Each structure stands twice: as structure tokens, then as C-alpha cells.
């Protein structure tokens, strides 16, 4: 059944992609939920959204440079330690389906603060437990509650005007990129100073403080919300996949790019922490700083999407993703080549990611939370697949095997983009978008 579902998405994307440019700027006001909020969002508030997203997303990625230490502490086989990342992503996927859609029917301010408080509790459990089962449960909870990031992204997109939505999403996503990449560096530094448990305890305290700040600064929602039932709300996330070809195509691209992304970042700690490199957690975390180029890609890709060049941005970025693996494969012979590959990989992934979100947010403004929930569900699946596959392949085929896996996923991404992109209209700007500027 899963294969049939994926095949249906691929075929539907191919047959219906000619409709993408026309539907890219189309809204459907007859949705069962409340209409789009027309309030403006200031740059100051946007930056606060970005900071909050960065702090929240870091909770998902703290474990990446700590896998070897956590495995030793709990006596877990290194070949299956990627399960920690996978379980976090499973929790994240559940949160996307069952928590994020609530942003379309409840007060987002209360939902965001509640998630922050519960996240602090989950992080404390991870930091203090001595039981392997509780560690896994805690990591699932961390992932489940980290979806506050997507509630914030959808909220920012709703508050932005149609002509600046891509830019706003780009700025907020820049905060996510910074948090995602700095997580590895910060966790490495804290782990070297006080052990891996210190990382999660510090995060618990920071998350609690973040919840307090958000309670004070988040805009209060004055608009009445629809009283649609929760089952109907969750079901509508799946319905959107049937109705919207853009969402289907962009969700598959998200799965592929983040499978490649997770393949690299999950396995990286294994060769770098072993001889002849034998790097510390802090040194390994420094590689995350190289990926900050993705911040520039996030902002720039959002502006290009606002102007109708999302398809071209996606294609070029996917090609760069493939090229990055050529540099990454040189890890044993050149650290400089590895750093170059990190920069290219992160830039490419974030450019596609922001473009994806800008395009799907344009189709149904009244359903931002459900759109991002459905889209990010595929992101989470891709990240989970990449995490567990990369550690298993590394044990059998080493770093070259990991690079081959990443390159193969990138090739599939390019092929899928090419198949689902209309050959004639690829580089044309939608008329409705052109008229906005």
C-alpha cells in the first residue's frame, strides 16, 4: 500500500504539474476553516519568530554529534545509535499530523506557549534518565513537541502580506537554519565541558525562558476561529494532498532533500570521532558553522519564489546538492573539501526548502498550518530514513557508502524535479504574481 501511495503521488505530479503555475497564486475561500489573517508583521516580530524557531529546532539536532557518547553511556550498539535520531523524527512526524493543524482552529499563541512548556519537561527527562527505554521515549517527546517551529512558520506566513510572504518565510527559515547548524556546535562545546546530559539540561532551561518571552510578545489573535471538529481537521491534512498537486510534488522533494541532509549529518560524527581524525565534539560541531551559508540561501530563495522563479531555483539547487557529495567524499584526504561540500549541501537544501514552503503557502492562505503539517510530514520521513540508513551503511561500506547513498538520493531528486516540471512554463513568471510587483 505504501508503494502504491508513493506511485500515485509521482504519477499525479507528472500529470498535473502543468497546472502549478496557474494554481500557485490561487486561494480557495470556501475552506471550512477561518479565512486568512490580514494583519501585518513587523521585521522585529519576524526576527523574534526566527530566534524562537532556531532555539526550538536545535532540540532535534543536538544528538547528532553526541551519538557516539550516548551509545557508550547506555551501552547501545553504534550501528543502531541512529535510532535516536529516527525516533526523534517519528515523534516530529506525529506532531506534524496531530498538533500543527490545531493552529488553524485554536489560538496559536496559547498553542505555542504550551508546546514550549512541555518541551522543557521532555528535555529534562532526556537529561536525567538512566534508563534506555526512557531515553527513547523522551526523544520521541522532544520530536513531538519541536513542531512548535512549524506553528510559528505558519503563523508568520499568515501575518505577512501576499507580496512579502516569501521574504517573511525566508527570514523565519533563516532562524531555523541557524538553530539547526549551531545546534551541533553548541552541543559539542557543552558536551566537552560537562557531558552530553548538560546539553539537554541547558536546552530545557532555555526552552522554558523562550516560552515566557513568546507569551509576552506574540500577537494576540482577535479573529474568531472555526469550531470544526478535531477529526475533520486532521482528515483535511490528508485531503489537501488529494486536492493540491503543488503540495504533493513539493512534499516528495522535501522527503528526498532531507533524506540526503540527514544521511550526511547523522553519519558525519562516526568517521570524524574515530582515528585518524579523532576530533572532539566541539571540533565536529564546528562543521555546522560552515553550513551557515544556508541562511543566505533561505532568504534569497524566498525572494525568488515571490517573483515566480521557484521552479528554476529548485532545479539549480538540486544539482548543487548532487555536486556537494563529490567534495564530501574527500573527507579522508581533505578537510577543506569536506567544508566546501558542507557549504554547498546546506545552501542547496535550504534553498529548496524555502522555495517549497513559499509555493505551498500561496495556494491556500486559510490553511497554512495544515499545509505545513502535510509538507513537513514528508520532511520528517525523509530525515528518519536518512538517519537510520546512513549509520547502517557506514558500518558495512564506510564513508564511501554513505556518500554513494547521498548522491543516489540527490539524483532521484533531480529526476523527480525534471519529470514534474513543465518544460515550457518552467521559467515563466505567473501572471498573478507579476501583477503584484
Image (cartoon, helix red, strand yellow):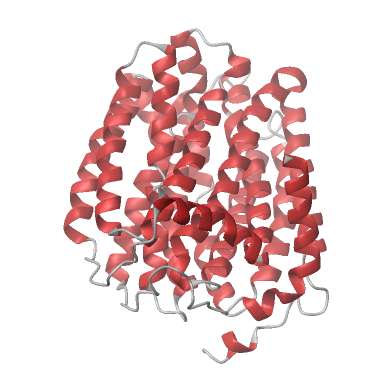
Q: Is residue 62 visible?
A: yes
Residue depicted at x 30% and y 44%: 115
Residue depicted at x 77% and y 79%: 425
| Of residues 435 and 111, the one drawn nearer to the viewer in this rendering | 111
| 167 in relation to 253, above or below | below
- Residue 168 figure quarter: bottom left
Question: In the image, 426: left or right of 40?
Answer: right
| Of residues 326 and 356, the one drawn nearer to the viewer in this rendering | 356
| 131 in relation to 231, above or below | above
| Of residues 133 and 191, the one drawn nearer to the viewer in this rendering | 133
Question: In the image, 85: left or right of 103?
Answer: right
Q: Is residue 414 visible?
A: no
Percent x, y for residue 374?
55, 54
| 230 in relation to 384, above or below | below
Residue depicted at x 59% and y 25%: 272
Question: In the image, 107: left or right of 64?
Answer: left
Percent x, y for residue 177?
47, 51
Percent x, y for residue 178?
43, 50
Amino acid at each position: 500500500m505504501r508503494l502504491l501511495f508513493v506511485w500515485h503521488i509521482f504519477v499525479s505530479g507528472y500529470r498535473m504539474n502543468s497546472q502549478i503555475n496557474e494554481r500557485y497564486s490561487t486561494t480557495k475561500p470556501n475552506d471550512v476553516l477561518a479565512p486568512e489573517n490580514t494583519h501585518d508583521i513587523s521585521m522585529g516580530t519576524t526576527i523574534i519568530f526566527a530566534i524562537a524557531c532556531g532555539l526550538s529546532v536545535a532540540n532535534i539536532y543536538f544528538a547528532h554529534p553526541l551519538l557516539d557518547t550516548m551509545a557508550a553511556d547506555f551501552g547501545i550498539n553504534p550501528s543502531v545509535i541512529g535510532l535516536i535520531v529516527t525516533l526523534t523524527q517519528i515523534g516530529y512526524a506525529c506532531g506534524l499530523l496531530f498538533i500543527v493543524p490545531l493552529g488553524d482552529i485554536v489560538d496559536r499563541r496559547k498553542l505555542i506557549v504550551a508546546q514550549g512548556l512541555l518541551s522543557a519537561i521532555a528535555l529534562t527527562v532526556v537529561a536525567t534518565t538512566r534508563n534506555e527505554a526512557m531515553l527513547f521515549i523522551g526523544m520521541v517527546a522532544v520530536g513531538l513537541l519541536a513542531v512548535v517551529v512549524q506553528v510559528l512558520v505558519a503563523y508568520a506566513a499568515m501575518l505577512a502580506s501576499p507580496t512579502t510572504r516569501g521574504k517573511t518565510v525566508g527570514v523565519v527559515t533563516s532562524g531555523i537554519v541557524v538553530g539547526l547548524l549551531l545546534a551541533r556546535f553548541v552541543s559539542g562545546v557543552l558536551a566537552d565541558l560537562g557531558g552530553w546530559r548538560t546539553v539537554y539540561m541547558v536546552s530545557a532551561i532555555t526552552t522554558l525562558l523562550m516560552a515566557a518571552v513568546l507569551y509576552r510578545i506574540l500577537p494576540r489573535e482577535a479573529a474568531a476561529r472555526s469550531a470544526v471538529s478535531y477529526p475533520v481537521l486532521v482528515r483535511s491534512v490528508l485531503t489537501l494532498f488529494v486536492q493540491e498537486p503543488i503540495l504533493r510534488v513539493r512534499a516528495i522533494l522535501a522527503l528526498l532533500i532531507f533524506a540526503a541532509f540527514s544521511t550526511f549529518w547523522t553519519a558525519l560524527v562516526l568517521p570524524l570521532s574515530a582515528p585518524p581524525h579523532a576530533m572532539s565534539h566541539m571540533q565536529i560541531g564546528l562543521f555546522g558553522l560552515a553550513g551557515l551559508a544556508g541562511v543566505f540561501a533561505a532568504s534569497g530563495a524566498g525572494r525568488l519564489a515571490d517573483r515566480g522563479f521557484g521552479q528554476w531555483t529548485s532545479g539549480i539547487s538540486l544539482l548543487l546538492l548532487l555536486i556537494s557529495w563529490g567534495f564530501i567524499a574527500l573527507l579522508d584526504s581533505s578537510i577543506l573539501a569536506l567544508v566546501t561540500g558542507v557549504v554547498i549541501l546546506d545552501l542547496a537544501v535550504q534553498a529548496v526548502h524555502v522555495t517549497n514552503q513559499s509555493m505551498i503557502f500561496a495556494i491556500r492562505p486559510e490553511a497554512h498550518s495544515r499545509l505545513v503539517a502535510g509538507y513537513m510530514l514528508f520532511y520528517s520521513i525523509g530525515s528518519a530514513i536518512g538517519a537510520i540508513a546512513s549509520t547502517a551503511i557506514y558500518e558495512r561500506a564506510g564513508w564511501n557508502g554513505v556518500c554513494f547513498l547521498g548522491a543516489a538520493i540527490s539524483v532521484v531528486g533531480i529526476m523527480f524535479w525534471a519529470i514534474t516540471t513543465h518544460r515550457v512554463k518552467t521559467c515563466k513568471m505567473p501572471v498573478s504574481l507579476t501583477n503584484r510587483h
